[in-house]
Amino acid sequence: MDVVSKTPRRGLSVELDEAIWASGFHVPMPEGYEEELVERLKRRDEAAFTELIRLYEKRIFQLVLRMLGDRGEAEDVAQDVFLTVFKSIDSFRGDSKLSTWLYRIATNHCKNRIKYLDRRARGKKTELDDLSEHDRVESASMSASAHVARPDQQAEAHQMEAIMRRAIGELDEEQRELVILRDVENLSYEEIQAITGLPEGTVKSRLHRARLSLAKTVRAASEPGTIGGKKTER
């Protein structure tokens, strides 16, 4: 059975559906709704599992796609994430939001898959172009490329986005996780601490080093006569 579908499913109220897609990763729910959903999941209610997938499948898939940079791998890992959730829901104690727990599972799966792919020397592919414009990487370092009008500006913006995606893909899995959680998903430091288990000072210092590495890679790739981060011969 495919856990992650190709198109969003319908369910709940129209108002909640609209709020879900307008929000960030954390899905707004009526008071007590999340607790009820968790209890149903713990009872192995198949309808509750289907509902959880509908609520979070898009967000989980985008997160793992950004972490892995490969659509096929992202589809496999996203399905593994939901299967893990279903099998491990009894371990969820409610100390954090359900979405935070899902994030933790997803990022751990991604880091394990990255290590596995590295061992197999598969390299890193980038297939993020098929993400919708609204869902593309929107970190502060890329904000200058948004909302451009002229064709030359659009081309430059798309080139910078491609450079940034490649640069993020070249980070190690720990740095990549922090950059995506903070600068792409716009999570707070408190939320990142809950997901990674790292102290705030460690999160900030590692994120600082990751941003320095990104800036260096982007500068090198943006130099005149450079294609894909490598200088061309005249």
Image (spheres, rainbow, N blue to C red):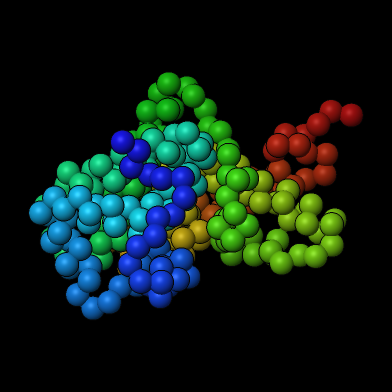
Query: Which image quarter holds the N terminus?
Result: top left
Which residue does the image show at 49% across and 47% down from the upper left?
A: 66
Which residue does the image show at 55% across and 58% down from the upper left?
A: 135
Total numbered labels placed on residues in the image: 0
Residue 128 versus residue 205 in the image, above or below: above
Is 99 left or right of 123, judged from the image as shown?
left
Which residue does the image show at 25% across and 42% down from the upper left?
A: 83
Q: Nearer the viewer, residue 91 or 39?
A: 39
Is 139 left or right of 30, judged from the image as shown?
right
- Location of residue 210 in the rendering, given as x and y in whole percent from the top left corner: 50, 51
Which residue does the image show at 43% across and 21% down from the upper left?
A: 120
- Location of residue 98 in the rendering, given as x and y in whole percent from the top left corner: 25, 61
Q: Residue furthest top?
A: 120
Query: Splitting the image into 4 quarters, where does residue 223 fall?
Result: top right
Residue 2 versus residue 9 in the image, above or below: above
- Location of residue 191 in the rendering, given as x and y in whole percent from the top left corner: 33, 65
Residue 104 can be seen in this image = no
Residue 122 versus residue 45 in the image, above or below: above
Query: Which image quarter holds the C terminus?
Result: top right
- Location of residue 124 in the rendering, given as x and y in whole percent from the top left corner: 53, 32
Q: Nearer the viewer, residue 162 or 37?
A: 37
Is 187 left or right of 108, judged from the image as shown?
right
